[in-house]
Image (tube, rainbow, N blue to C red):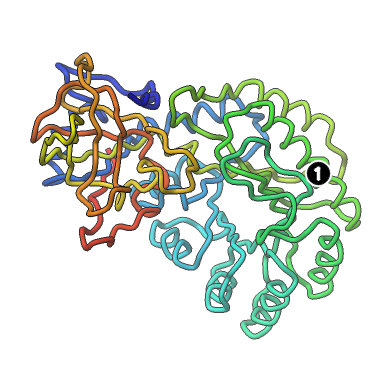
C-alpha cells in the first residue's frame, strides 16, 4: 500500500457525497454533461488570496502567474482579487486581454520571446522582463520601429536559489535571467536607449513548503535588489520578488504557515534603504492561489483484477492530470490526494490502483491506494488539480481530447 496525499481542508461531504461550491460532484457532472471534468472553486481561490493578504505586509502587491491556470473564468475572477498578472508567452497575453485585464497590470517573462510576441507586448504596454542583452537589443530596435517607449525590467539570475524548491529558477547557469555581474551594464544600455526602466524580476524557485527557506530567500532577494539599485545609481520603480509558496501534494507534506513569513518580510521592509523605499514590491504566485481549489473528476468505467491486484479504470488519466500520474518532473512517484467522490466519507476497505484509459502503463492516478470499495459508475476525485492540470497535460495524446472545465 502507498499512502495518499492529504485532501485539502476546504472540502466536506453531504450524505457521503463530496461537496464542491455547495453542491455535490454529481451535480456538477450533470451540469457539465459528462466526465472527465475539472471543477474549480471560486470560494477557495478567494480564501487563499485573503489568507495571503492577511499574513503579508500591506505594502506587498500580489501578482497571479497565469501559467498555473489560465482558464478564462479564473482569469476574470482574479481580475478583482490580485494586483498584477505575470505571463510567459504571446498566447497568454491574448488570454489576459480577452479577459479584459488592463495591460499596464501585466508583466511578460520567458527566455525565448519571439519578435512577434515582443511587438504585441510593446504595443499593448506590458512590462517586458528581459532575460538577455540580445533580447533587450531586439526589444529596443522593435520599439523604435513601432514608435513605442518600451517598459522594461531586467530578470536577474541571482547567485542563490530557493532551498528545497520543486523547480529551481535561479542560481548557477540558467536559461532564465541575466547573471548578476551583467545587470548593471544592461541597465545602462536601457537608460541610454530611453527605455522606461521599471526595475527587477528575481524569481528563485517554486513549490517550497519550507518557510525558513522562503524567509531566507526573500531577504536575499531584497539585499540583492538594493545592491543593484545602488550600483545603477537610481531608485527602481518595481521589484518582483518571485513566489515559491508550495501546497501539500503528498503524504507527509505540511502546509506553509504564512504568518512568520509575513512577519520576517515586514521586518525586512522596515530596514530597506532609500533605493527601495518607494519601490512597488510584488510577490508572484500561481499554484498557491489555485492549486487546492481544483478537483479532477473521472468516472470508473471498469473494475478488474490482475494477479490479485484491483484496478479501477477511469475515463480520464494523465492526458488531463499529468502531474498526478507522476510524469511531470517527479523523481519518485507518490500519490496525490484521491477519493471516491460519491463515497467521500465512507471508510476505506481495499487497496486499489486508479488508472486512466490510455494505452500506457504510465497512466496511473493512484497507485496501490487504500480507498472505499468502488464500482463501475462511481467517480474518482483527484485533488490539488487547480494548477498545472488541464493546460500542462498532453490533452491530445491518443486522441482522447481535453476535459471540460468549470468555475463554481
Q: Nearer the viewer, residue 345 or 154?
A: 345
Establish if 145 lies above or below 139.
below
Residue 268 in the image, given as x and y percentages of width and height: 78, 31
Instruction: Return the x and y of residue 399 as percentages of the image width and height.
Output: 21, 63
Assess disc 1: are there few (<14), some (14-19) or many (≥20) residues with their C-alpha within 10 Å of its C-alpha: many
Choose top left, top right, bottom left or bottom right for residue 148.
bottom right
Q: Which residue is mark 1?
A: 276
Total of numbered circles in the picture?
1
Q: Residue furthest front?
A: 307
Q: Is residue 392 shown left or right of residue 260? A: left
Quadrant of the rendering where the N terminus is positioned: top left
- The part of the image, by quadrant, that contains residue 259 is top right
Q: Residue at x 8, y 35 (%)?
A: 377
Question: Toward the viewer: 361 or 259?
Answer: 361
Residue 256, above or below 347: below
In the rendered structure, the answer to whether residue 319 lies left or right of residue 278 reads left
Residue that sits furthest to the top in the current view: 347
Residue found at the very far left of the displayed protein: 376
| 132 in relation to 334, above or below | below
Residue in the picture at 67% in, 65% down: 151
Residue that appears at 24% across and 61% down:
398
Q: Quadrant of residue 356?
A: top left
Please name the residue shown 59% across and 62% down the image.
110
Indicate left or right for 29 with 41 as reference: left
x, y percentage for residue 407? 29, 42
User: Looking at the picture, how far across and down is residue 171, in whole percent?
Assistant: 73, 49
Amino acid at each position: 500500500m502507498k499512502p495518499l496525499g492529504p485532501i485539502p481542508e476546504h472540502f466536506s461531504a453531504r450524505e457521503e457525497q463530496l461537496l464542491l461550491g455547495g453542491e455535490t460532484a454529481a451535480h456538477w457532472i450533470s451540469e457539465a454533461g459528462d466526465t472527465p471534468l475539472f471543477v474549480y472553486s471560486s470560494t477557495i481561490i478567494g480564501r487563499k488570496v485573503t489568507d495571503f493578504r492577511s499574513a503579508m505586509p500591506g505594502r506587498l502587491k500580489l501578482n497571479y502567474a497565469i501559467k498555473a491556470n489560465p482558464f478564462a473564468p479564473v482569469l476574470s475572477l482574479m481580475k478583482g482579487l490580485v494586483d498584477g498578472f505575470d505571463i510567459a508567452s504571446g498566447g497568454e497575453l491574448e488570454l489576459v486581454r480577452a479577459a479584459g485585464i488592463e495591460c499596464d497590470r501585466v508583466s511578460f517573462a520567458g527566455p525565448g520571446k519571439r519578435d512577434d510576441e515582443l511587438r504585441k507586448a510593446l504595443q499593448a504596454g506590458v512590462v517586458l522582463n528581459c532575460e538577455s542583452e540580445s533580447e533587450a537589443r531586439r526589444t529596443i530596435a522593435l520599439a523604435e520601429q513601432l514608435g513605442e517607449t518600451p517598459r522594461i525590467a531586467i530578470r536577474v539570475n541571482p547567485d542563490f536559489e530557493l532551498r528545497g524548491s520543486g523547480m529551481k529558477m535561479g542560481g548557477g547557469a540558467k536559461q532564465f535571467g541575466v547573471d548578476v555581474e551583467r545587470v548593471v551594464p544592461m541597465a545602462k544600455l536601457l537608460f541610454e536607449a530611453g527605455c522606461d526602466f521599471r526595475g527587477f524580476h528575481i524569481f528563485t524557485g517554486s513549490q517550497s513548503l519550507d518557510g525558513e527557506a522562503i524567509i531566507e530567500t526573500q531577504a536575499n532577494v531584497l539585499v540583492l535588489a538594493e545592491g543593484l539599485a545602488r550600483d545603477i545609481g537610481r531608485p527602481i520603480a518595481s521589484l518582483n520578488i518571485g513566489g515559491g509558496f508550495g501546497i501539500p501534494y503528498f503524504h507527509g507534506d505540511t502546509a506553509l504557515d504564512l504568518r512568520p513569513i509575513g512577519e520576517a518580510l515586514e521586518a525586512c521592509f522596515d530596514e530597506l534603504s532609500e533605493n527601495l523605499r518607494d519601490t512597488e514590491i510584488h510577490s508572484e504566485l500561481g499554484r498557491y492561489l489555485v492549486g487546492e481549489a481544483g478537483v479532477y473528476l473521472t468516472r470508473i468505467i471498469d473494475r478488474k483484477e490482475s494477479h490479485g491486484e484491483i484496478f479501477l479504470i477511469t475515463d480520464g488519466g494523465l492526458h488531463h492530470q499529468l502531474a498526478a500520474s507522476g510524469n511531470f518532473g517527479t523523481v519518485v512517484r507518490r500519490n496525490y490526494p484521491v477519493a471516491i467522490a460519491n463515497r467521500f466519507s465512507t471508510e476505506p476497505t481495499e487497496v486499489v490502483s486508479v488508472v486512466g484509459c490510455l494505452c500506457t502503463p504510465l497512466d496511473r492516478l493512484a497507485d496501490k491506494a487504500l480507498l472505499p470499495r468502488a464500482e463501475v459508475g462511481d467517480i474518482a476525485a483527484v485533488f490539488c488539480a487547480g494548477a498545472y492540470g488541464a493546460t500542462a497535460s498532453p490533452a491530445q495524446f491518443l486522441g482522447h481530447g481535453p476535459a471540460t472545465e468549470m468555475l463554481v
